[in-house]
């Protein structure tokens, strides 16, 4: 559902769903535009980690400091989140593994929209999302959940240090 909603209402900071593959009358796969570089790998490369996997397979010359720019990450992520909110969805999986660089648009893009929910949705266990990035004490979906995740993301981009697990 969320992919069809975004397809009908595209935004440069949210990965657009291109369609699906149908075999024998059944959906066998979904199609998205291919992006190559994860935010987590750009930050790892910036801070000298050899764990920057996706960036090593890209056109960037990491050894010479040629990396996608990090100065627009927070602006682009906030714009993508705001767009999803305008569509009635709260994105609950803000983490550097779910943000990729788009060379064509020169912008950062939210990917993996599987953890989008309507405000007010109640979870009796933990809310979905990536451990260490989400609020493990939250049970009701709200846009207020974005701010702690965004603060963690901003700190990670500046320091290269992952947040502690709660």
Image: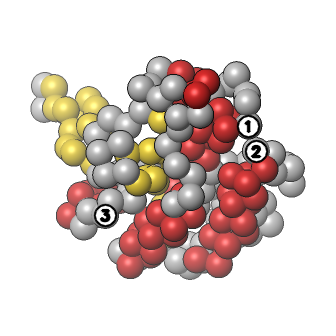
Q: Give the color scheme: rainbow, by chain, secondary structure or one colour.
A: secondary structure
Label 1: which residue? 47
Q: Earlier in the sequence, mark 3 or mark 1?
A: 3
Residue sitting at x 49%, y 43%: 68
Which residue bears the numbered disc 3?
11
Q: Quadrant of residue 144?
A: bottom right
- The quadrant holding residue 21 is top left
Q: Which residue is mark 2?
A: 160
Task: Bin the neighbour count of mark 2 within 10 Å (Cα to Cα): few under 14, some 14-19, many 20 and up.
Answer: some
Q: How many marks?
A: 3
Q: Distance from label 3 to label 1 (Cα)?
A: 30 Å
Of tags 3 and 2, which is closer to the observer? Answer: 2
Percent position of residue 77, x then y: 51, 62
Above or below, 55 relative to 106: above
At horizontal 21% and vertical 39% (from top left) the residue drawn is 20
- Confirm whether residue 31 shows in the render: yes
Label 2 residue SS: loop
Location of residue 93 in the rendering, given as x and y in whole percent from the top left corner = 58, 55
Residue shown at 78% from the left, 50% from the top: 159
- Does the CB distance between marks 1 and 2 fall below 8 Å? yes
Which one is nearer the viewer's eye here, 69 or 41?
Answer: 69
Which numbered marker is on residue 27? none
Q: Residues within 10 Å of mark 1 (few under 14, many from 20)?
A: some
Q: Residue at x 13, y 25 (%)?
A: 24
Residue nearer the viewer, 12 or 94? 12
Query: Alpha-carbon distance for marks 3 and 2?
Result: 28 Å
Residue 1 position, x and y percent, is: 32, 58
Mark 3, other Cα within 10 Å: few <14 / some 14–19 / many ≥20: some
Q: Position of residue 160 (x, y in %)?
A: 76, 44
The local secondary structure at tag 3 comes to loop
Of residue 38 and residue 126, the one placed in the foreground of this image is 38
Secondary element at tag 1: loop
């Amino acid at each position: 559902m969320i992919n069809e909603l975004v397809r009908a209402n595209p935004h440069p900071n949210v990965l657009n769903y291109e369609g699906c593959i149908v075999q024998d009358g059944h959906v066998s796969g979904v199609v998205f535009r291919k992006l190559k570089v994860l935010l987590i790998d750009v930050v790892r490369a910036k801070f000298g980690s050899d764990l920057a996997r996706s960036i090593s397979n890209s056109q960037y010359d990491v050894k010479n400091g040629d990396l996608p720019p990090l100065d627009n990450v927070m602006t682009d992520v906030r714009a993508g989140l705001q767009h999803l909110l305008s569509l009635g969805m709260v994105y609950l999986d803000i983490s550097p593994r779910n943000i990729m660089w788009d060379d064509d648009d020169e912008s950062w893009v939210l990917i993996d929209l599987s953890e989008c929910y309507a405000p007010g949705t109640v979870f009796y266990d933990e809310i979905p999302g990536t451990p260490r990035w989400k609020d493990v004490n939250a049970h009701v979906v709200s846009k207020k959940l974005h701010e702690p995740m965004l603060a963690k993301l901003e700190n990670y981009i500046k320091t290269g240090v992952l947040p502690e697990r709660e």
